[in-house]
Amino acid sequence: MQLIQETADLSAYLAADEVIDHHHPMVRETAARLAAEATDSYAYARLAYEFVRDTIPHSADTGDLRVTWRASDVLARRTGICHAKAHALTALLRAEDIPTALCYQRLRDDGGAHVLHGLVAVRFHGAWHRQDPRGNKPGVDARFSLTGERLAWIADPAADERDHPTLYATAHPAVLDALRTAPDREALGRTLPSTL
């Protein structure tokens, strides 16, 4: 799949905003702690990915009804759905000057309905590489990789699933609106878009 930058301006993929608040003390402290363990930017990116994937549970896996969307809140509350975890990873990577984009997939859930899944892409060696910090569980084995995608799920066109090719510099407005307005995760499941 050909990934398409939303903007040619690479600095947009380093920017902070209300969602990707990488200037927030919580994000800066977490980034500094991870950077102290890393030998280079690749090692840092892998450590940040594993930190978000493994230490911030996906709220659907734990039954946590809280909805988080701002990166600093995801890190502080230690919970979030895939989109929130993608926001947290994006902030941690941008905090260390690693261009990072938000990406989306249209997938089928266990009940057969379509859902919009959130992940990220990092830019290394002149190319974008998608990463999925959703969190592993039985049947899901996502890993950080620059040599081939190791995502939680592979879109199946026969099931009307697809990878959205656009690399977003900011959270998609429809996703962000659903996250901001949902009173809890169950309500969020009814308001998140199923496609872009």
Image (cartoon, grey):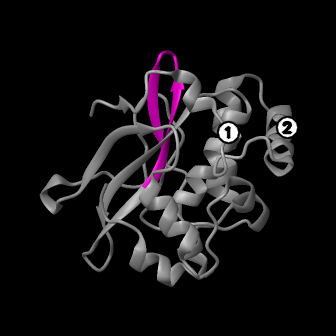
Q: Quadrant of residue 124?
A: top right
Q: In whole angstroms, how far apart are the C-alphas of marks 1 and 2?
A: 17 Å
Amino acid type at mark 1: Ala
Element type where label 1 sits in the image: loop
Examine the structure image and report whether residue 121 is included in the region drawn in magenta.
yes
For the view shown, which residue lies furthest in the left direction?
Answer: 158
Q: Do the residues labelled 1 and 2 touch (CB within 8 Å)?
A: no
Could you tell me which quadrant the N terminus lies in? top left
Q: Is 22 rendered above or below residue 78?
A: above
Name the residue rendered at 67%, 68% in the picture: 79
Check disc 2: other Cα within 10 Å, few if <14, some if 14-19, many if 20+.
Answer: some
**Residue corresponding to mark 1:** 16
Please provide percent x and percent y for residue 40.
73, 22
Q: In which quarter of the image is residue 93?
A: top right
Label disc, if present, on residue 32 of the rendered structure: 2
Please provide percent x and percent y for residue 44.
71, 32
